[in-house]
Amino acid sequence: MSAHSYINMTQPKSRSVDRYIEQDKARQAQQDLVSGRIAVRLAQTFQALSDPTRVRIISALSHTELCVADIAALLDMTQSAVSHQLRTLREWKLIKHRKVGRIVYYTLDDEHIHDLFHRGLDHVMHG
Amino acid sequence: MSAHSYINMTQPKSRSVDRYIEQDKARQAQQDLVSGRIAVRLAQTFQALSDPTRVRIISALSHTELCVADIAALLDMTQSAVSHQLRTLREWKLIKHRKVGRIVYYTLDDEHIHDLFHRGLDHVMHG
C-alpha cells in the first residue's frame, strides 16, 4: 500500500491523479481541499471558540445584544475577566460592538457565527 | 454601572432578573446560555478544529471517504503524521472509520461536522 507514495516522489507538487490509490475519491477531495492560507484562518476562528468561557459568551449573545456588565452578571465573572475574553472574540471577528453613550453592547459578528455555534451545539447534543 | 453587581452578591446563584441592567435582553440570554458542562464539550469540539492540518483533512473529507495513504498524498505529508492527526480527530468524534480488508477509510462523523466546517468557511470567505 505504501509503494504508491514513491511513484511520484520526483514530482511531489504535480498532484497528478495517478499518485492516488482511489482516483475518483481523490479527485473529489482535491476539489474540496482548502488552501493552507484558508486553513490557517479557519483554524484561528475555531481556536477562538475553543475556550468554555468564550463559548458561553457566544451562546448568551446568540439571540440578543448585551453590555459587559450583564454578561459578567450572567456568567458570575468580573467585568475585567469578561472584557478580556470579549477583546479576544473581537480580535478574531466573532463579535462586534456598538456604543450607546457610555454603554458598549456586543453582538455576534454575523449570522455565520450564530450558525457555527449552533452546528457545534447540534454535534455535542446529538452527535 | 458597576453598582448592580453588588445588589445580589449575597445570592450569587439566584439569577434573579433584577441583577441585570437590561432585564429583557438578560432574560433572553439566560435562555440561550449553555451550561459549563456543555461549554467544555463544545470548546473541545472547536479545539479539535483549531489546527490547519486537521482543518485541511476535514475539508478533504467533506464529500468523500478517503484512506490514509490518499490523505497523505493529498496533503504532501507522511502517513505517520496524517495518522496522528486522524487519531486526534477520531478521539474528538469529528471523523469515523470503516475497514475494508486492510484499508481503513475515514469519513466525517456526521452531517453536523460537515455543516460546522462549512459555516466556518463561510465566515472566513465572506465575513
Image (spheres, coloured by chain):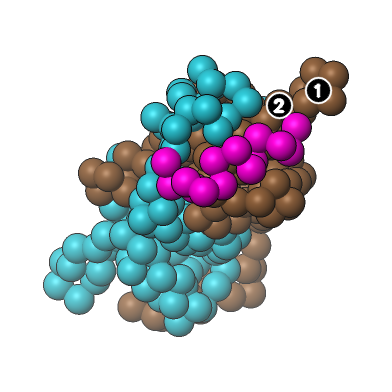
Chain colours: A cyan, B brown
Q: Measuring from the top left, give residue A52's x and y in whole percent.
A: 60, 59
Helix, strand or loop status at disc 1: strand
Residue A13 inside the magenta-drawn segment: yes
**Which quadrant holds the C terminus of chain A?**
top right
Q: Is residue A46 left or right of residue A67?
A: right
Per the model, the C-alpha gap separating discs 2 and 1 is: 6 Å
In the image: residue A24, left or right of residue B122? right
Q: Quadrant of residue B22?
A: bottom left
Q: Are marks 2 and 1 on the same chain?
A: yes
Label 2: which secondary element: strand
The numbered disc on residue B99 is 1
Left or right position of A37 against A21: left
Image quadrant occupied by the N terminus of chain A: top right
Residue A28 image point, x, y percent: 46, 23
Can residue B37 be seen in this snapshot? no
Task: Return the residue found at the far left.
Answer: A101
Q: Nearer the viewer, residue B123 or A122?
A: B123
Tell me which chain the residue with mark 2 is part of.
B
Magenta stretch bounds: A1-14
Q: Amino acid at mark 1?
A: Lys
Classified by dominant secondary structure, the portion drawn in magenta counts as loop
- Along the line of sight, which residue is nearer the eye, A16 or A46? A16
* Circle 1 chain: B
Q: What amino acid is found at the position of numbered circle 2 in the picture?
A: Tyr
- Counting every numbered tag in the picture gives 2
Residue drawn at (56%, 47%) of the image: A9
The one nearer the camera, B36 or A17, is A17
Question: Is the Cβ of the residue at disc 2 closer than 8 Å to that at disc 1?
Answer: yes
Earlier-in-chain disc, 2 versus 1:
1
Seen as rendered, the residue at the extreme right is: B101
Answer above or below: position of B73 versus A57: above
Q: Which mark is residue B105?
A: 2
